[in-house]
């Protein structure tokens, strides 16, 4: 994978979709069309300090005049969303990458979605496309109240009678068993807080869904408060060189320090841009982007580590 081009896009419209979700419409200041994208894709938004955050595109992929994203204000977060809410007013310039899709629509006979809160964004674009294509879909949307459910009107329009809403603060708490038993060829997509994903995944597995039919979009890798990083060695298969990774450094940092040109984007284990192969070793996977099957031979060096040693396919 290569680093993505960053475009300077103008905020054409900024509105609060709920009290804490900012909905932005972005345009190119001089070009009539933006790069094409498929439902499920996200863009990187570059912050003033050079860090990036990812936001799913929630508009219409047929209309390339604009990109639409929605940003939830996280007052307990690291400041990115607060900055976006304050700085990205109408007319402001946002530094945004070309789209990338880690959460594509699968080839399936039936598409079932469980969306939680701001997790609505990729699901909205995907549901719109699937309905337009006449595919069989069902969408569960969970939030505390209807007023706190971002893009609810747009999702209702996109899904029609295929939408079920669950508002816990209004007496309708989502039961993960609502995903129902697996039917051959179906795909289940989950997008929202990690605890929602875990509840849905556990319920789906118990109801006979195969792991390979369950797809998730994560904006944050699961955090294990008790994880204590240990030092390990990484050997490069191409040269045989062995690099030592201290407990307080990431594998990605050490690779770069030794001259390896490694792409990266989120450095949080969610975007997939740094992922590379490995051929030997016990890897401690700490990302939220590599599938269970691919974990046998793929590693995200921005967050993942190894027990004692690993041989990288680099
Ligand atoms: S840089 Fe995003 S997963 Fe590593």
Image: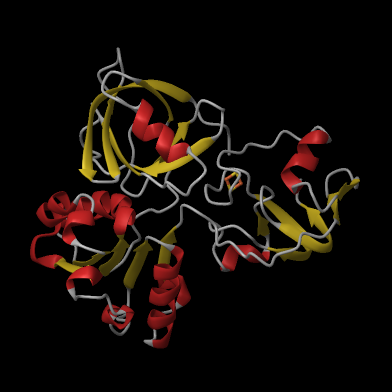
Vertical placement of residue 277 versus 224, above or below: above
Q: Does residue 209 appear left or right of residue 264 in this picture?
A: left
**Nearer to us in this view, 259 or 224:** 224
Q: What colouring style does the render use?
A: secondary structure
Q: Residue 163 sits in which quadrant?
A: bottom left
Tell me residue 310's x, y (percent): 81, 58
Taking the view exactly as shown, the residue that stands out farthest to the front is 75
Taking the view exactly as shown, the residue that stands out farthest to the top is 30
Residue 118 visible in the shown view? yes
Q: Does residue 129 appear left or right of residue 307 in this picture?
A: left
Tell me residue 263's x, y (percent): 63, 36
Q: Residue 258 sits in which quadrant?
A: top right
Vertical placement of residue 156 versus 62, above or below: below
Q: Quadrant of the C terminus?
A: top right
Q: Does residue 164 appear left or right of residue 302 in this picture?
A: left
Q: How many marks?
A: 0
What residue is rendered at 62% in x and 65% in y? Answer: 224
Tell me residue 18's x, y (percent): 22, 47
Q: Residue 264 sits in which quadrant?
A: top right
What residue is rendered at 28% in x and 39% in y? Answer: 22
Q: Quadrant of the N terminus?
A: top right
Residue 99 visible in the shown view? no
Vertical placement of residue 212 versus 230, above or below: below
Tell me residue 244's x, y (percent): 89, 49
**Nearer to us in this view, 191 or 106:** 191
What residue is rendered at 32% in x and 74% in y? Answer: 185
Vertical placement of residue 33 versus 238, above or below: above
């Amino acid at each position: 994978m290569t680093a993505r081009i960053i475009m300077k896009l103008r905020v054409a419209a900024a509105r609060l979709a709920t009290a804490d979700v900012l909905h932005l419409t972005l345009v190119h200041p001089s070009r009539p069309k933006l790069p094409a994208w498929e439902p499920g894709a996200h863009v990187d938004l570059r912050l003033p300090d050079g860090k990036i955050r990812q936001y799913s595109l929630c508009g219409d992929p047929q209309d390339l005049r604009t990109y639409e994203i929605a940003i939830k204000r996280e007052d307990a977060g690291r400041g990115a969303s607060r900055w976006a809410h304050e700085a990205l007013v109408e007319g402001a310039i946002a530094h945004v990458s070309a789209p990338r899709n880690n959460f594509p629509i699968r080839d399936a006979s039936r598409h079932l979605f469980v969306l939680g809160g701001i997790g609505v964004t990729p699901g909205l674009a995907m549901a719109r496309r699937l309905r337009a294509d006449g595919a069989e879909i069902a969408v569960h949307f969970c939030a505390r109240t209807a007023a706190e459910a971002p893009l609810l009107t747009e999702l209702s329009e996109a899904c029609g009678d295929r939408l079920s809403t669950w508002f816990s603060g209004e007496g309708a708490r989502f039961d993960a068993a609502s995903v129902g038993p697996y039917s051959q060829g179906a795909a289940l997509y989950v997008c929202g807080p990690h605890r929602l994903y875990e509840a849905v995944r556990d319920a789906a597995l118990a109801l006979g869904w195969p792991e390979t039919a369950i797809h998730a979009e994560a904006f944050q890798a699961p955090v294990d408060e008790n994880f204590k990083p240990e030092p390990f060695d990484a050997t490069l298969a191409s040269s045989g060189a062995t690099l030592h990774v201290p407990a307080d450094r990431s594998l990605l940092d050490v690779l770069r320090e030794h001259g390896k040109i490694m792409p990266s984007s989120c450095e949080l284990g969610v975007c997939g841009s740094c992922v590379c192969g490995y051929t030997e070793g016990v890897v401690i996977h700490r990302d939220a982007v590599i599938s269970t099957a691919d974990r046998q031979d793929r590693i995200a060096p921005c967050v993942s580590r190894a027990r004692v040693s690993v041989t990288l396919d680099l």
